[in-house]
Structures are given as structure tokens and as C-alpha cells.
Amino acid sequence: MDVVVVTLCRESLAKAIQSAHEVIPEANIILITDKIRADLTLGMLRNKGLAMARSEYTCFLDDDIVLSKDWYDKCMKALQNKSTIVVAGGDTLGCIICKTKQFKEVGGFPKMDSFLEDKLGDRFVILSDAICEHEIPRGIPVIQHMLYGLMLNFQTESKVGVYHNPRKSVKQIFSFLKEGSPDYAFCELFWIVKTLFVLPFILGEKDPNKK
């Protein structure tokens, strides 16, 4: 299986690759090391790796995630048991598996990779019990990591950066608090704040009078 890793070669990369080799049979690592910039979003970088993939299935793995065999087995079972499913993943887009040919046919990731679920609909299955481990220490390091991502830039369909659906973010905050993860809940709150800054760009792109 091809494993696409978009990375800036952080210290956590080695453990991510090691876990891929331990969990995924005959894992072929495809490293994408380009930096996100105004004309190159994370979704586009992942698609660059997708274009290089030749195996029946392709895994997309963030460089700060350690895979578990349990996660891999559950995703593969979901993909193999239902022909209409194109992508399967767990609690994060940072580790998903797709049917390579079908995913290429639908164009891969949208420019805003966080909108993958909206793009694929019922062809994307999210497995609530398929959990991956982040290699970022809990507490302050989690917040520092999230702030780094938030400061990358803003993104709408034509501008770089990321914003989350506020409604989903609110639900996620309560979910994090319920499971005893206040650091992640605090980070999710930043996405709501960032969306407020991005809102003028979103509304501008939806303006019917805009040429």
C-alpha cells in the first residue's frame, strides 16, 4: 500500500513512518515535503502524493501520528465490505485510507481538505472507534501546535488557510470536554475565532454580483 505523508520533516516523522511499516503490509512511503503557501494548500499537496500512488489502496498519514493495527483493520474492513465507500478514516483526516482508483476519479481532496466529508458524502465513512495516536505531548505543546496551524494563513475556495464549520466545532468542543481533553477543547475554540476573521472572504466568494 502507498502511504502519502505530507511533512516538514519534524522529529515526529520517524515514528510515523515506523508505525506505517509496522501496521501496513508492504508500506511504500511517499514523502511530500513542499511547504503550504498561497498557491499550494494541504489538500493540493496530498493530491500530489495521490497522483504518485499506484497501489489499490492509498493511506494518507500526518507526520505526527502513530497508527495502530486496530485502526488499520477497521478502515480496511469498511472499504472492503461496501463497494460504494471510497474513503475510510477515524477521528482525524490525518490518517485515512482510500481506494486509489476511485479517489482519483472523484478528484481526490478538495482544495480545502477539511471539506472532504462534504465532497464525498456517504462515500466517506468515519469510524468513531478507529483511533490514532498523536505524537504531540498533551497540554501546552498541543496548543502551540494548533496555533502554528492557525497562523499558516486563511483559506476559502481561492485563499489559503483553514477554517472549520462553527457548528461542528462547538460539538467537538463539548466532545473533547466530555472525554477529559480540555487542551484539545481550547484549541478547537481557536478555529471558531479564526472563522470570524475568514468570514468576509467566504461571503465575498458567495456574492452573486462578484465577477
Image: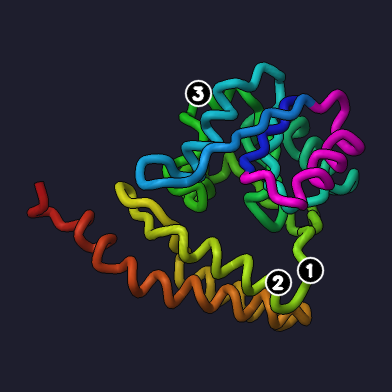
Q: Do the CB atoms of the residues marked 2 and 3 lie less than 8 Å apart?
A: no
Q: Do the CB atoms of the residues marked 1 and 2 lie less than 8 Å apart?
A: yes
Position of residue 154 measured from the top left corner of the image (x, y, whole percent) = 38, 59
* Image quarter of the N terminus: top right
User: What SS does tag 3 mark?
Assistant: helix
Please name the residue that numbered disc 2 is placed on. Answer: 141
Indicate left or right for 2 with 143 as reference.
right
Residue 146 found in image quarter: bottom right
Above or below 79: residue 135: below
Q: Nearer the viewer, mark 3 or mark 1?
A: 1
Residue neighbourhood size for the residue with mark 3, other residues' Cα within 10 Å, grouped as few (<14), some (14–19), many (≥20): few
**What residue is at 42 percent from the left and 46 percent from the top?**
37
**Disc 2/disc 3 C-alpha distance (Å):** 38 Å
Q: Amino acid at mark 3?
A: Glu
Tell me which numbered mark, 2 or 3, is placed earlier along the sequence.
3
Please name the residue that numbered disc 1 is placed on. Answer: 137
**What residue is at 47 percent from the left and 50 percent from the top?**
115
Position of residue 73 measured from the top left corner of the image (x, y, whole percent) = 86, 40
Position of residue 107 measured from the top left corner of the image (x, y, whole percent) = 46, 29
Range shown magenta? 8-27
Between 14 and 134, the one nearer to me in the picture: 14
Between 198 and 206, the one nearer to me in the picture: 198
Please name the residue that numbered disc 3 is placed on. Answer: 105
**What residue is at 79 percent from the left and 68 percent from the top?**
137
Queried whether the magenta region covers residue 15, the answer comes back as: yes
